[in-house]
């Protein structure tokens, strides 16, 4: 079993749709959660970062963490063609720096 | 430059040859990471440096892979006797101090093709 599971998609939605991207993780010792966006032939860039259960909003993006069910989500409101990219969830151990463990990534396409 | 810089951006090599991949982290960042991304796959952790030391090298897939970091800055990932399964994008990232609150900033990677 992978430490972080993510549906690879691809996911195709019309412009303006609400997008839901999800990951599950296996180890309750993971306490820090991130979402990265990766455009084709580019490195991943950090979108959202949280360490507590509940919701965190940043513009059109909302990150949600449910530690009881080991489930993390990213919601994109009013999706735009420019949101077309691969979205990667990542986790990190509590009180331990160092590596991030990534999910497989979900490829998203927003059609105009 | 402001970001993480990797070179070369593309590398084609013959099976059995050695390759060196270079990473220049963001100035002042003490932590440096190497990841590998195969086609359609997520990021696979290879090694983590704090300064010039590597407290976590658990992701290196075989003894053909090695990495070093000098002067707390530039890092080189070396793959000896390359195999076709080594073909992937090799990504480097740096963070300010490697702490849990310190996000990773990635370069655009080196795309390695082994023929």
Image: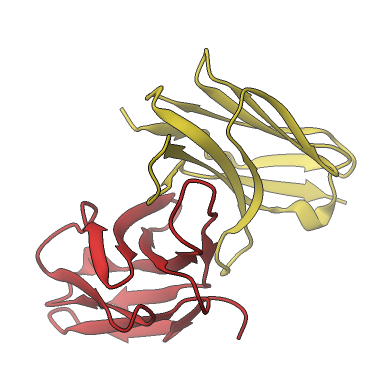
Chain colours: A yellow, B red
Residue B54 place in picture, x, y as percent:
24, 63
Image quadrant holding the C terminus of chain B, namely bottom left
Residue B19 place in picture, x, y as percent:
24, 83
State left or right for residue A51 relative to residue B114.
right
Q: In this view, does B106 lie above or below A94?
A: below
Image quadrant holding the N terminus of chain B, namely bottom right
- Location of residue A34 (image quadrant): top right
List the single residue furthest toward the top.
Answer: A68
Residue A59 place in picture, x, y as percent:
85, 44
The tally of labels here is 0
Residue A45 place in picture, x, y as percent:
61, 59
State left or right for residue A52 relative to residue B113.
right
In depth, the one of A14 and B33 nearer the eye is B33
State left or right for residue B2 relative to residue B17.
right
In depth, the one of A56 and B36 nearer the eye is A56
Query: What residue is at 9 percent from the left and 65 percent from the top?
Result: B63
Query: What residue is at 50 percent from the left and 75 percent from the top?
Result: B28
Query: What residue is at 55 percent from the left and 54 percent from the top?
Result: B103
Query: What residue is at 34 percent from the left and 32 percent from the top?
Result: A2
């Amino acid at each position: 079993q992978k430490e972080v599971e993510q549906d690879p998609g691809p996911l195709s939605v019309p412009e303006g749709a609400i997008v839901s991207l999800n990951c599950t993780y296996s180890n309750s010792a993971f306490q820090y959660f991130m979402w990265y966006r990766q455009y084709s032939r580019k490195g991943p860039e950090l979108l959202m970062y949280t360490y507590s259960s509940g919701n965190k909003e940043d513009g059109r993006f909302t990150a949600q963490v449910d530690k009881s069910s080991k489930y993390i989500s990213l919601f994109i409101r009013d999706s735009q063609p420019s949101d077309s990219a691969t979205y990667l969830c990542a986790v990190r151990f509590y009180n331990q720096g160092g590596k991030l463990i990534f999910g497989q990534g979900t490829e998203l396409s927003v059609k105009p | 430059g402001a970001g993480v810089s990797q070179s070369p951006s593309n590398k084609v090599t013959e099976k059995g040859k050695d390759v060196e991949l270079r990473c220049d982290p963001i100035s002042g960042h003490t932590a440096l990471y190497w990841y590998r991304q195969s086609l359609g796959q997520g990021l696979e952790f290879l090694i983590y440096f704090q300064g010039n030391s590597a407290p976590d090298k658990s992701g290196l897939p075989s003894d053909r892979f090695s990495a070093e970091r000098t002067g707390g800055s530039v890092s080189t990932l070396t793959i000896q006797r390359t195999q076709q399964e080594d073909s992937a994008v090799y990504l480097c990232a740096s963070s300010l101090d490697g702490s849990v609150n310190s996000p990773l900033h990635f370069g655009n990677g080196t795309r390695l093709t082994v023929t």
